[in-house]
Amino acid sequence: MKHTPTRSLARLMATASVGLALMATAASAQIRVWTTENQPARLERQEKMAADFASATGIEVEMIPVEEKDLNTRATAAFAAGDLPDVIYHPLSVALPWVEAGILDAEAATEIVDELGRDTFAPGPLSLAATEDGVAGVPVDGWTQMVVYRKDLFDAAGLEPPTTFANVTAAIEALHNPPELFAFVAPTKVDESYMSQVLEHVLLANGASPVDSDGFSGFDADKLKEALDFYKAIADASPPGELYWDQSRTVYFAGQAAMIIWSPFILDELAGLRDSAPPTINDDPTSRDLAAATGIATNFAGPSNPDGAAWADSRYFGITADADTDDAAAFVKYAVDEGYMATLGIAPEGKFPVRRGTADAPGSFVDAWSMLDVGVDRKAPLSELYDASMIDEIVGGLDVAQRWGVAEGQLALASKIINSQVINRVFREYRDGAIDIDAAVAEINEELAKIE
């Protein structure tokens, strides 16, 4: 068991008070793992993986479901009581703050990454959780937001894929023909987080960020203007009304949109595998025609950022300060190595392999993941639904994964800025003609400067 010499007297007393209980349960659960994947079917798959690990190693694992919204509060309380679990499956947002608070053992995570081979992991998730000396947690899975588009229509019109602002603008000019076909369905409903997420994606693509290493920096005016003008162009090429994720998917599924921005959780629905969200492009709700006609772009670039960016979310296994470090490390290594397909198999369409393979077989995990079944009411592997180049594009976005504030150590402030929905509101004032572009830039920077 790993101990921390500077642990306060209160934590030592709390540890002593639970010692007998821990000894009593040690035979049935040598390590405890918190997971935010708490839906019954997903939890069942995780428990099966843990049982397979126990059979292989003799180390019993208790999988404990935790609501993601409660994760930070529970971890803080457990840390104060000296009763953290051994491993926590956690989002990016808590990774670095938990290292700073002493909740996570970054040294243990870094040793695992180095042992498995740093080059076997996608660089994006590693850089997002980078600490001064290593990494906050071991990357497990992730996904990148995607421009989903009608590749068949693009090909027929001789258009380049929508990987840049310019390419999207050219596609709008060529394809926009309402009401039969809208070139885009961009979110415009101000109080929806979907709009916040898509706006961050567009701003990241143009290299525009409101924070630097010192905190709030304000947006560069030129980069912000370019991004707001582009967002106005895609909003103007969208159907009328207050639009959010529901209309985005519905209009695209009906064959009435050329482009949308969505998460990869749309991939199984596109292929008619989910009865609750069927494609309606034809009379067959189980048709794979729309999937066959669809392409995606993960890396997206604006004129001020030609290298582009991919808005991404990534998840990690963190080894805690109270862990039985050796057994916890053994479990984490198993979960991203021998048991990796079981880990990703919890929800393959939204869990891209951030570990691409092993040193001896560099692409083996990507290949195996592409063969995992996706879907709800019907099942099929992604490799059966989409061609190899699209699979490569899906996972390739994680190489350049970005989020505001991560590299600068300002993720908490960036999250408050996003959640304030100031950018959403001011953009709507600009798009609706209430203010001009210069006033919009000034108002956004002035309002965001008030956030602490």
Image (cartoon, helix red, strand yellow):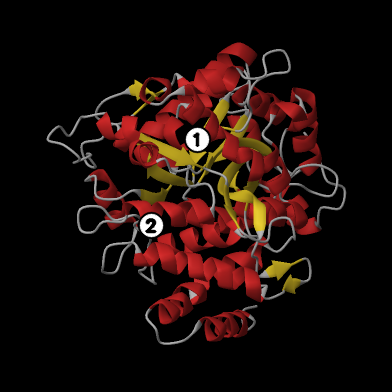
Question: Can you name the residue that lies furthest to the left here?
Answer: 283
Q: Residue at x 56, y 47 (%)?
A: 313
* Nearer-N-terminus badge (2/1): 2
Kindly identify the amino acid type of the residue bearing the numbered disc 1. Answer: Lys
Where residue 8 sits in the image (x, y, percent)? 81, 57
Secondary structure under tag 1 reads loop
Reply above or below: 188 against 354. below
Reply above or below: 233 against 201. below
Where residue 283 sits in the image (x, y, percent)? 12, 35
The part of the image, by quadrant, that contains residue 246 is bottom left
The image shows a total of numbered marks equal to 2
The residue that disc 2 covers is 173
Q: Residue at x 26, y 69 (%)?
A: 241
Question: In front here: 195 or 304?
Answer: 304
User: For the C terminus, which image quadrant?
Assistant: bottom right
Q: Judge from the rendering whether residue 431 lies leftward or rightward of residue 33; answer left or right.
A: left
Taking the image as drawn, is residue 170 in sight?
Answer: yes
Where residue 397 sits in the image (x, y, percent)? 58, 40
Kindly identify the amino acid type of the residue bearing the numbered disc 2. Answer: Glu
- How dense is the environment of label 1, judged by Cα within 10 Å: few (below 14), some, or many (20 and up)? many
Where residue 247 sits in the image (x, y, percent)? 27, 56
Q: Which mark is residue 438?
A: none
The residue that disc 1 covers is 351
User: For the N terminus, which image quadrant?
Assistant: top right
Front disc: 2 or 1:
2
Q: Residue at x 31, y 36 (%)?
A: 270
